[in-house]
Amino acid sequence: LTMATREDQAFLRGDGTQGTPRGLRYWAPAANVNGDAAGTGTLPSLANVDTDLKLMVNLLGNADVRMIRPTWFMAPRTRNFFSFLRNSQGFLVYPSMVEMNPTLLGFPVKYSNNIPINLGTGGGDSEIYLVDMADVLLGESTQLILEVSAEAAYSDGNGTLQSAFSRDETVVRAIQRHDLVMRHDASVAVLTTAYYD
């Protein structure tokens, strides 16, 4: 599970430094990274949501992206926002978002806790990505390297250095080599400052 979580983090938001993959967030060209219509720390209106979604779809369409396998990526909180959003008559605006395999504007939705919800000046913003997955290339080595040590030191979840020897623990390190590249950078659009709560 830890390896899968780390891969997810790298493929979504890795910055490509220190020998790590560059994720979708940082493959997007600057012109395809825009703040939401409502602004940071502001709950969007239905009109704002329409504006944001239209912008993202247009960014890909205007860049001649083929739209073979467009997919949304968002935090679970954002998915819930879309799932419960109602119009003035009380009807669900996006009923397909409550399905087991949700879609938004006909495109599949994937959600991950590795897309943060504590961004922006107020610390409550998130991001939404629209990506044509037909332009995403993943490279992965078939070799998995495992190393085991009873003397190693490691940082715990709080960043405190721990000694495996003094704690009578065995540390296992798994190394897998992989990378992500985009065939066409403009196949990624990112909505920032998304306070879709």
Image: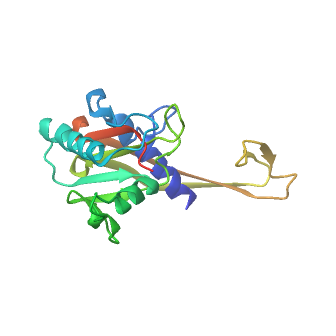
The reply to whether residue 196 is in sight is: yes
Quadrant housing residue 186: top left
Observer-nearest of 168 and 125: 125
**Image quarter in which the N terminus is found:** bottom right
The extreme front residue here reads: 89
Residue 121 position in % (x across, y down): 52, 31
Q: Residue at x 40, y 56 (%)?
A: 81
Quadrant housing residue 61: top left
The reply to whether residue 183 is in sight is: no
Q: As drawn, is 152 to the left or to the right of 97?
A: right
Residue 113, relative to residue 186: is it above or below? below
Residue 30 position in % (x across, y down): 30, 27
Q: As drawn, is 80 to the left or to the right of 169?
A: left
Residue 164, relative to residue 160: is it above or below? below
Observer-nearest of 4 and 51: 51
Residue 138 position in % (x across, y down): 33, 49
The extreme top residue here reads: 30
Observer-nearest of 177 and 194: 194
Q: As drawn, is 27 to the left or to the right of 152?
A: left
